Amino acid sequence: MTTTGQFTTEDLDYCSNLVRENARDMYLCDLLLSDAARSKANVLHAFHVEITNITLGHGDPLASEVRLQWWAEVVSGDRNEEAGGHPVGRPLLTLLENEPVVAPALLAKIEAHIFDLYQDPMPDRTTLEGWCGETRSVLFNLIARFEGAEQNTELANAAGHAGCCMGIIGILENMPLLRNKGQVYVPSDLLQSVGLTAQSFLAKPEEQHKAAILGMASLAREHELKAMTAIKSLEPAGVSAMRSLALADLYLKRLEKNPMSAFSAAKRVSSLRAQWRLYRGL
C-alpha cells in the first residue's frame, strides 16, 4: 500500500472520488489548494459528505442519529479499530492525529447536524446563522489553517460569513429534497414577514414562497458582501481557502432571476463554468 505523506494513496483516491461525486464544488476548490493542504481538505470534505449523506437521507431519524454518534466517537478516539476499516474513517484518524484543531470543530459540526434529522422549524435568523457556522464555516476555517493561515479575528469573520453564504445557498439548492422530508430551514421570522408559517411553506408554492426565497437569497448576499470585505484583510493562505465563495454569485443570480426555480430540480452550474470562475478567483 503506497502512501502520500501519512495518507495512503488508495484512501486519498477514495476520498477524492467521493467528494467529486457528491460535492463537486468542494472537489473543484480542493484541486486549487496547495499540495500540503489538498490531501487534508479531501479527507475533511469526504467526512462532510459522509455526514450530509446521513442527514439528507430518508432513514429513520433515530437510526441516523446513531450513525452520527458513531462518527462522533470516531472523532473522539473511541472507535479507532472500527474506523481503521473504513475508507474515510482511516484517513480521518490520520488527519486528527496531525491536526489537533480538527477534533473539537468536527464534534461541534456533528452536534449541529442533529437538527437536520428532525422536522423542527428553523426558529430565527440567528439560529440559522449559528447552524451555518457550525456546519459550513468550520470547513472554511479548517482549510485555511491547513494552508498555514493564522487563526485570528479576520479569518474567523471571513470564514463565518463565507459559511453562512454558502450554507444558505446549499439550503436553496436542496429545497426540493428538504421539502419532501418536511424540513424547513427558512427562519420562522422571515416566513412570518411574508405571510407564511413553516407548515404553509411546505404547501404548493405561491407568491409568498417567492418572497421567502428572495429573502433567503438576500440574506446570502448580505453574508457574501461581508465575507468579501473580510477576505481583503486575509493573508494569501486564508484567501485560498475561501475560493468557493466565488461561485456564490452564479447560484444567487439564478435564484434572484427565477425564485420559484428553487422548488424544482435545479439545473447545476456546468463544471466548466464553475472551474473557470474558481480559476479566476475572488
Image (tube, grey):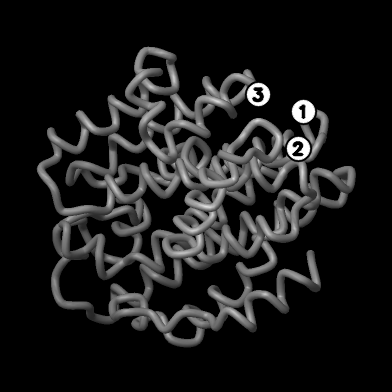
Label 2 crowd bin: few (<14), some (14–19), many (20+), radius 10 Å: many
Pointers 3 and 1 in contact (CB under 8 A)? no
Quadrant that contains the C terminus: bottom right
| Image mark for residue 99 | 3
Residue that carries the numbered disc 1 in the rendered image: 151
167 displayed left or right of 154: left
Q: Residue at x 18, y 42 (%)?
A: 118
Residue 216: percent from the left, percent from the top? 45, 63
Q: Residue at x 77, y 30 (%)?
A: 153
* Label 3 or label 1, whichever comes before in sequence order: 3
Q: Mark 2 highlights which residue?
A: 155
Q: Locate residue 252, reporting x and y percent.
A: 55, 74
> Percent from the top left, x then y, of residue 231?
80, 50
Real-space Cα distance between discs 3 and 2?
18 Å
Neighbours of disc 1 within 10 Å: few (<14), some (14-19), many (20+): few
Q: Secondary structure at mark 2?
A: helix
> Is residue 44 shown above or below 258?
above
- Amino acid type of the residue tagged 3 in the rendering: Glu
Which percent across, then down, holds residue 145?
73, 34
Instruction: Measure how far apart labels 3 and 1 are at the Cα level.
Output: 14 Å
SS label for mark 3: loop
Quadrant of the rendering where the N terminus is positioned: top right
Asked whether the residues under the numbered discs 1 and 2 touch, taking CB atoms below 8 Å apart as contact, a structural biologist would say: yes
Instruction: Examine the image and state in which quarter residue 210 appears.
Output: bottom left
Q: Is residue 36 left or right of residue 15?
A: right
Q: Residue furthest top?
A: 78
- Which amino acid does the dot numbered 2 rest on? Leu
Amino acid at circle 1: Gln
The image quadrant that residue 7 belongs to is top right
Circle 1 — which element?
A: loop
